[in-house]
Image (cartoon, helix red, strand yellow):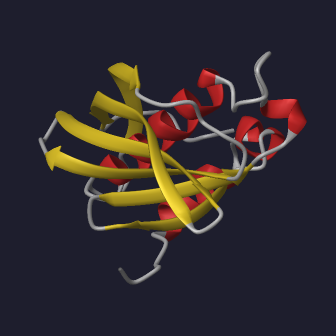
Amino acid sequence: MDFEIDPRVDASFARQGFMDLIGARLIHAKAGRCVMETAWSERLTQQHGYFHAGVSATLADNAAGYAAYTLMPEGASVLTVEFKLNLTNPARPGLLRADAQVIKPGRTLSVVRCTVSTLADGKETPCAEFLGTIMTLLQAPPPP
């Protein structure tokens, strides 16, 4: 995989204060795929010391939205309509990575899947599977 980032995605990502709060960073966002990750921190955990499911859901939702956004026409905006998240393993300390791929692009609605994994000690462990519907907004107001 070539690590490229669509400039529109980069600009949109930079406007998300919550992504900064959880330490998320873009790795790749081009041609219907987006990869982002965040490093483990005690501030991002639940009571057992694993990443909180909300962090997994946030990364998956954002990666899915941006994967779809890379296929949208210039001037469009992106909005998640719905998603389902199956938590398959504890999100153990390490690097949390969301890897999203558009599986059905559409003019108005696109379907995206995303696998969230932890990377630690040279091992990648899937911990969540996401399936979502992302909307293309063609007449969205410009961001503030």
Say which residue appears at 58% left-offset and 69% top-offset. Answer: 122
Say which residue appears at 68% left-offset and 25% top-offset. Answer: 52
Say which residue appears at 76% left-offset and 20% top-offset. Answer: 48
Is 69 situated above or below 137?
Answer: below
Q: Nearer the viewer, residue 57 or 124?
A: 124
Q: How many marks?
A: 0
Q: Position of residue 46 (x, y in %)?
A: 76, 20
Q: Position of residue 56 (x, y in %)?
A: 56, 33
Furthest residue toward right = 42
Furthest residue toward bottom = 2
Q: Position of residue 78 (x, y in %)?
A: 40, 38
Q: Position of residue 1 (x, y in %)?
A: 35, 80
Say which residue appears at 35% left-offset and 31% top-offset. Answer: 130
Q: Nearer the viewer, residue 15 or 100?
A: 100
Quarter of the image for residue 70 reads bottom left
Is 92 situated above or below 131?
Answer: below
Is 63 situated above or below 43?
Answer: below
Q: Nearer the viewer, residue 51 or 71?
A: 51
Specify whether 138 is left or right of 141.
Answer: left
Specify whether 11 is left or right of 132.
Answer: right
Quarter of the image for residue 27 reads bottom right
Specify whether 143 is left or right of 80.
Answer: right
For the C terminus, which image quadrant? top right
